[in-house]
């Protein structure tokens, strides 16, 4: 009976070692994925900033064109709209 318990304990230790190795490998994969997500989020943030800059430039061009074609009172209103 003692031999059976020793065999069972040895088998359990082996399974624990395998699970421990799998855990370490999985943690490495998770860390790599988190780093990739972080890089992706930084890229998205940069892209959003660039898109806002492009939109601001385009909006500025539209305002300039509108200001060129309107009366002075309307021009003041549009300039306030653009700067706020």
Image (cartoon, rainbow, N blue to C red):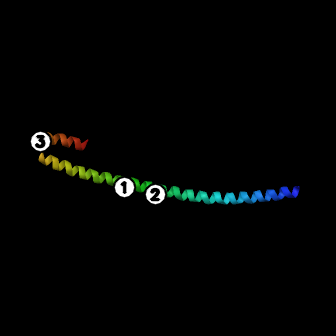
Q: Badge 3, how many Cα within 10 Å: few under 14, some, many 20+?
A: few
Q: Position of residue 5 (x, y in %)?
A: 84, 55
Q: From the image, tell me which residue sits under label 3.
A: 72
**Vertical position of residue 44 compared to residue 79: above or below:** below
Q: From the image, tell me which residue sits under label 1.
A: 47
- Residue drawn 41% across the image and 57% down it: 43
Secondary structure state at the residue bearing disc 2:
helix
Q: From the image, tell me which residue sits under label 2.
A: 39
Closer to us: 1 or 42: 1
Cα separation between marks 2 and 3: 49 Å
Sequence order check, earlier mark of 2 and 1:
2
- Residue drawn 28% across the image and 51% down it: 55
Q: Is residue 68 left or right of residue 2?
A: left
Closer to us: 16 or 43: 16
Point out the image quarter for the N terminus.
Answer: bottom right
Point out the image quarter for the C terminus.
Answer: top left
- Residue drawn 49% across the image and 58% down it: 36
Q: Badge 1, how many Cα within 10 Å: few under 14, some, many 20+?
A: few
Closer to us: 7 or 34: 7
Cα separation between marks 3 and 1: 37 Å
Secondary structure state at the residue bearing disc 3:
helix
Q: Position of residue 19 (x, y in %)?
A: 68, 57
Labels in figure, total? 3
- Residue drawn 22% across the image and 41% down it: 81
Q: Position of residue 64 (x, y in %)?
A: 17, 49
Sequence order check, earlier mark of 2 and 3:
2
Task: Tell me if label 3 and label 1 are in contact, CB under 8 Å.
Answer: no
Cα separation between marks 2 and 1: 12 Å
Closer to us: 20 or 79: 20
């Amino acid at each position: 009976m003692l031999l059976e318990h020793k065999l069972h304990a040895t088998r359990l230790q082996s399974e624990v070692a395998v699970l421990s190795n799998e855990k370490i490998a999985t943690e490495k994969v998770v860390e790599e994925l988190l780093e990739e997500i972080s890089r992706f989020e930084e890229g998205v943030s940069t892209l959003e900033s660039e898109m806002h800059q492009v939109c601001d430039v385009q909006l500025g061009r539209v305002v300039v064109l509108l200001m060129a074609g309107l009366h002075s009172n309307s021009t003041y209103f549009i300039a306030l709209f653009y700067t706020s």
